[in-house]
């Protein structure tokens, strides 16, 4: 039986990438978003149906999802848009996926109240079905499987990928906050730039800085490990700069400043092209430690972050659309499909454990 599914926010850099990839592999999504002028031309080019609606009107959202079995939500910042789309999906009985990396969105998706409603409605809610957070989520589960008594988990990645407009806007949205980690099961903020260490992500040891990556939320729901932090390579100069930026947090959180920075992004940023994506793989690293002090490290190389997002989102969507009987509730990608899911995506290698 043919099933209908939708990409909402298909006019954005990543949404369009997913739409084009879907058509290439024979999938037929409905393209949707708020702007007729941005959605309709792409839909015409790809010979796909277009739907134009805002997330502000819950009745309009429910109406447009009435015949849709699954949505890949690509319209960020997700801290502003995801809750509205999730409510529409629950009302319509539609599976919900998104490509966020925002910890507060993951916490909302995995709240006990929302998880219970999704389970009763037999609706899957799965945030983070792209580079945020498929590879690191699978790495977390692989380490948990190999070290069941792990009490501490560190995850990180290195990539020379360019940054899309949507990612920049999400980064701007988070400028008014600091960093984040999970301590004894609780999300705990700390000043950005104050935690650093040496890490070999797969290309040799480098200075790295702790950041508020989404795995401080998702890896907890995937593994149950109570202490989690997340890292990216960062030079000592940039780490000092991050500490200085903390002094500007009140200013950077101003609504007018946020709006100005986002408008600048729209004018100046276009995202990496296909050639750049093909030349810039990503390197994933994870480290688990137990109370005895034993340490286990996992590494895996993957495709470029945006290529992986397109392939990962479509792989999750296809698996859900192909299954007629699946448990509803709030899920992580690795929770749905296991630690080895990342190894099955194009451009991925195999886990290396040490």
Image (cartoon, rainbow, N blue to C red):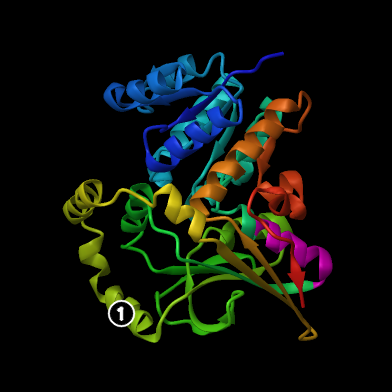
Point 63% across, 70% down: residue: 285
User: How many discs appear?
Assistant: 1
Identify which residue, 322 or 222, lies in the foreground.
322
Tell me the element at label 1.
helix
Taken as a whole, is the magenta stretch helix, strand or loop? Answer: helix
Split into 4 quadrants, where in the image is the C terminus? bottom right
Point 48% across, 65% down: residue: 212
Left or right for 254, reference 326: left
**In this view, which residue lies farthest toward the front?**
275
Residue 101 seen in the current view: no
**What is the magenta range?**
137-149
Residue 147 painted magenta? yes
Left or right for 322, reference 148: left
Residue 238 versus residue 121 in the image, above or below: below
On the image, the x and y values in percent for residue 82 come to 46, 39
Q: Write down the quadrant of residue 96 in the picture.
A: top right
On the image, the x and y values in percent for residue 143 come to 75, 67
Point 21% across, 54% down: residue: 261
On the image, the x and y values in percent for residue 74 come to 45, 38
Identify which residue, 322 or 159, lies in the foreground.
159
On the image, the x and y values in percent for residue 21 come to 53, 35
Q: Residues within 10 Å of mark 1 (few under 14, many from 20)?
A: few
Left or right for 89, reference 33: right
Split into 4 quadrants, where in the image is the N terminus? top right
Residue 72 seen in the current view: yes
Residue 328 painted magenta? no
Residue 130 versus residue 64 in the image, above or below: below
Residue 329 versus residue 36 in the image, above or below: below
Residue 307 versus residue 41 in the image, above or below: below
Q: Which residue is mark 1?
A: 241
Left or right for 336, reference 272: right
Q: Write down the quadrant of residue 201 in the picture.
A: bottom right
């Amino acid at each position: 039986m043919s099933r209908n599914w939708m990409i909402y926010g298909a006019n954005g850099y990543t949404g369009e990438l997913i739409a084009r990839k879907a058509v290439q592999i024979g999938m037929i999504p409905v393209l949707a978003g708020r702007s007729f002028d941005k959605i309709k031309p792409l839909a015409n080019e790809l010979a796909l149906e277009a739907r134009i609606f805002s997330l502000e009107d819950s009745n309009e959202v429910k109406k447009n999802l009435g015949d849709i079995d699954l949505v890949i939500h690509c319209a960020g910042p997700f801290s502003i848009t995801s809750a509205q789309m999730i409510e529409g999906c629950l009302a319509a009985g539609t599976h919900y996926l998104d490509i966020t990396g925002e910890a507060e969105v993951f916490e909302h998706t995995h709240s006990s109240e929302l998880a219970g409603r999704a389970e009763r409605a037999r609706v899957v809610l799965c945030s983070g079905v792209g580079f945020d957070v498929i590879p690191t989520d699978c790495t977390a589960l692989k380490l948990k499987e190999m070290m069941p008594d792990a009490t501490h988990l560190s995850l990180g990645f290195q990539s020379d990928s360019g940054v899309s407009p949507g990612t920049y806007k999400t980064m701007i949205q988070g400028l008014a906050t600091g960093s984040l980690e999970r301590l004894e099961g609780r999300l705990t903020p700390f000043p950005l730039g104050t935690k650093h260490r040496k890490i070999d992500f797969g290309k040799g040891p480098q200075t790295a800085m702790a950041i508020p990556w989404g795995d401080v939320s998702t890896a907890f729901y995937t593994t149950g490990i109570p202490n989690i932090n997340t890292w990216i390579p960062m030079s000592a100069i940039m780490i000092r700069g991050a500490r200085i930026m903390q002094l500007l947090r009140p200013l950077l959180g101003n609504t007018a400043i946020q709006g100005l920075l986002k408008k600048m992004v729209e004018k100046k940023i276009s995202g990496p092209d296909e050639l750049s994506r093909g030349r810039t793989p990503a390197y994933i690293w994870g480290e688990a430690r137990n109370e005895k002090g034993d340490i286990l490290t996992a590494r895996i190389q993957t495709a470029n972050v945006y290529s992986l997002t397109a392939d990962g989102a479509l792989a999750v969507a296809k698996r859900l659309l192909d299954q007629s009987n699946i448990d509803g509730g709030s899920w992580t990608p690795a929770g749905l499909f296991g630690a080895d899911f990342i190894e099955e995506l194009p451009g991925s290698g195999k886990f290396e454990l040490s």
